[in-house]
Amino acid sequence: MSKQVVPLLVCAAVLVAGCGARGGATGDSTGGTPEPTPRGTPDPNPTAAPWPAYDVEDYTYTLRTSCFCGDRGVPVVVTVRDGKAAAAVYAHRGSGHAAGYPAGDWMRVTINDVIDAANTKHAYQVRVNWPKGQDYPTSVWVDRDQNIADEEIGYSIRNVTPD
């Protein structure tokens, strides 16, 4: 083997070993930067779940999702009445829709639906950003299974207005 190839192989081995050594991060209730945890390790912050329900029955809020789906990242205004998502409409004009146009039924989720996702048991990884003193999270991200690609989903909650 040539002397030039050996350093490249060593470098490649170090990179491969380093990439597999750490898993993702688990969230905390402070909104701070989560610490990485090794894959397969229990959540170091088990007191964070179950997260409490949002006790307001009527409100509107802006939802953004991050997923392997067509409307990822698009802001949707969700209206909740009597604890159920009554409507979901696009907040802004975009590709193929006008502001106020109805969003897909899968975007009709309440804040409690998002909190339920944060409380998913046996998920591979859950990250929650829930500022202290706030009644709801600002973001939730769930990877249900380490061995399945494209099933992760994230939610971002903004502009919550109780009615």
Image (cartoon, rainbow, N blue to C red):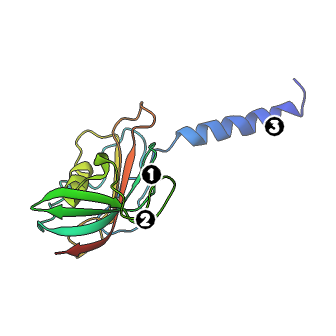
What residue is at 46 percent from the left and 42 percent from the top?
Answer: 68
- Of the image marks 1 and 3, the number of the one nearer the N terminus: 3
Q: Name the element at disc 3.
A: helix
How crowded is the residue under tag 1: few (<14 C-alpha within 10 Å), some, or many (20+)? some
- Kindly identify the amino acid type of the residue bearing the numbered disc 3: Pro
What residue is pinned by disc 3? 7
What residue is at 26 percent from the left and 53 percent from the top?
Answer: 108
Q: In the figure, 45 relative to 130: above or below?
A: above
Q: Which marked residue is nearer to the observer: mark 3 or mark 2?
A: 2
Residue 134 position, x and y percent, is 24, 74
Q: Is 117 displayed left or right of 20 in the figure?
A: left
Residue 155 position, x and y percent, is 35, 56
Q: In the figure, 33 relative to 103: above or below?
A: below
Residue 136 position, x and y percent, is 23, 67
What residue is pinned by disc 2? 33
How crowded is the residue under tag 2: few (<14 C-alpha within 10 Å), some, or many (20+)? few
What residue is pinned by disc 1? 72
- Kindly identify the amino acid type of the residue bearing the numbered disc 2: Thr
What residue is at 49 percent from the left and 59 percent from the top?
Answer: 94
Whole-number angstrom distance, CA of label 1 to CA of label 3: 42 Å
Nearer to me, 148 or 63: 63
